[in-house]
Amino acid sequence: MTSTDTRDVKATAGQIRRLEEAGCEIIRVAVLDDDAVTAIMAIRKAIRIPLIADVHFNHRLAIAAMENGADAVRVNPGNLGREKIREVVAAAKACGASMRIGVNSGSVEKDLLAKYGGPSPEALVESALGSVKFLEDLGFHDFKLSLKSSDVPTMIRACRMISEKTDAPLHLGVTEAGSVLASSIKSSIGIGTLLREGIGD
């Protein structure tokens, strides 16, 4: 993911081109407002690798990002709700875009948090499976999943569990991992453990 302000097209596209030269094959940019959505079009034209728009709470931004050339969007259904996800799916179909469905400790639905007493691995998995069923019922299959937690054992357990329940591609990561040193350690342990077990796409 870029560390630039997406609204700064020159800086963002420049950073992505440097990443391309280093071997990067896919890139994600934060889309926090309408100006960032507008920048997507120029960034897309300036780079070669697939561009993912990272959207947290505003489904309208996800739709507009795809219409402006984003190859995929990352959304958390738990933050948006089913009806807004339905609109995002319709736009993805129309634009030929894909989606990353994110489930993390901060976006698990309230009823599942109550059922499991917090963002447990079981809560993350049930949330993810609900999204999988919803998307497939809409006839949409161009998606990958990510189940993340800032707690590495929770992330590992959730990914192990979901890998046994669905064949959907799985994106690995530790969310809110912290400083450069802390995040390097936590990500290495979480991602490395799962890759060693053959889990993760």
Image (tube, rainbow, N blue to C red):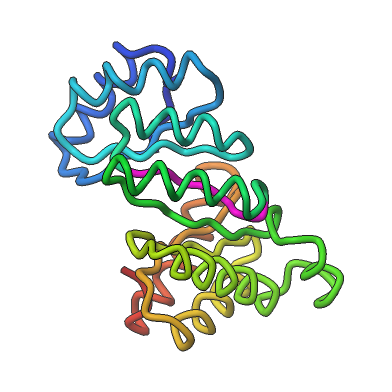
Residue at image position (60%, 54%) is: 77
x, y (%) of residue 140?
38, 61
User: Is residue 189 visible to the viewer in this orientation of the structure?
Assistant: no
Q: Which quarter of the figure has residue 66?
A: top left
Q: Position of residue 136 (x, y in %)?
A: 44, 69
Give the percent coordinates (x, y) of residue 196. Answer: 34, 80
Q: Residue at x 52, y 73 (%)?
A: 133
The reply, left or right, for residue 24 in relation to residue 137 is left
Q: Left of 180 or right of it: where is 28?
A: left
- The residue shown at (56%, 61%) is 148
Tell me: 112 left or right of 143: right
Q: Position of residue 96 (x, y in %)?
A: 26, 46
Q: Along the line of sight, which residue is nearer the eye, 78 or 119?
A: 78
Vertical comparison of 19 with 25: above or below: above
Residue situated furthest bottom in the rendering:
164
Q: Is residue 185 magenta?
A: no
Q: What residue range appears in magenta?
A: 72-78
Image quarter hosting the C terminus: bottom left
In the figure, 108 relative to 33: above or below? below
Residue 74 among those drawn in magenta: yes
